Image (cartoon, rainbow, N blue to C red):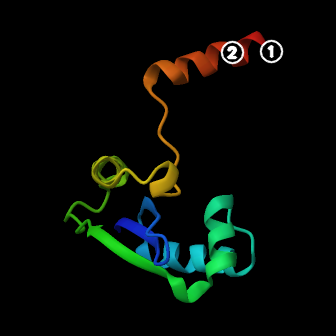
């Protein structure tokens, strides 16, 4: 488990994410991209244009398991991912991530949805 990136070797754009299973997420991303079905359309378009050989799947940081078998790793992974997002800023021309919404933006979305 840990934080990973998918890096476009032609334009250096990256997607940063976290997962409980690094092997599985790399397999899933690659399968979705090969089948032209990845939900991140800009990443899919670049994959289609540049080809699989121009992308790298890389581990940025691994999270070692704890001795507590019931430990919930998701909050730790979220913090690690946020740190890497802050460091790399993979948004707009630099990457495939979308900026996370602020607390105020999320509240406004809830208010807007209630008006419907």
Q: Residue at x 59, y 79 (%)?
A: 30
Instruction: Let me know if residue 40 appears in the view.
Output: no
Q: Residues within 10 Å of mark 2 (few under 14, many from 20)?
A: few
Q: Is residue 106 above or below residue 58?
A: above
Q: Residue at x 63, y 70 (%)?
A: 46
Picture disc at residue 112: 2
Q: Residues within 10 Å of mark 1 (few under 14, many from 20)?
A: few
Q: Residue at x 69, y 68 (%)?
A: 45
Question: Residue 70 or 65: which is nearer the viewer?
Answer: 65
**The C terminus lies in which quarter of the figure?**
top right
Q: Provide the secondary structure element on which disc 2 rests.
A: helix
Q: Provide the secondary structure element on which disc 1 rests.
A: loop
Instruction: Let me know if residue 54 appears in the view.
Output: yes
Question: Residue 37 or 24: which is nearer the viewer?
Answer: 37
Give coordinates of residue 88: x percent, y percent. Answer: 33, 55
Q: Which residue is mark 1?
A: 116
Give coordinates of residue 4: x percent, y percent. Answer: 38, 67
Give coordinates of residue 5: x percent, y percent. Answer: 41, 68
Q: Residue furthest right?
A: 116
Left or right: 108 in relation to 82: right
């Amino acid at each position: 488990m840990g934080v990973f990136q998918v890096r476009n070797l032609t334009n250096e754009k990256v997607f940063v994410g976290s997962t409980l299973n690094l092997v599985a997420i790399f397999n899933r991303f690659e399968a979705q991209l090969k089948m032209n079905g990845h939900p991140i359309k800009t990443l899919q378009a670049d994959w289609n244009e540049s080809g699989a050989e121009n992308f790298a799947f890389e581990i940025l940081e691994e999270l070692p398991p704890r001795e507590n078998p019931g430990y919930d790793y998701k909050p730790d992974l979220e913090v690690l991912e946020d740190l890497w997002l802050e460091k790399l800023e993979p948004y707009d021309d630099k990457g495939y991530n979308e900026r996370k919404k602020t607390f105020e933006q999320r509240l406004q979305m809830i208010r807007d949805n209630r008006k419907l």
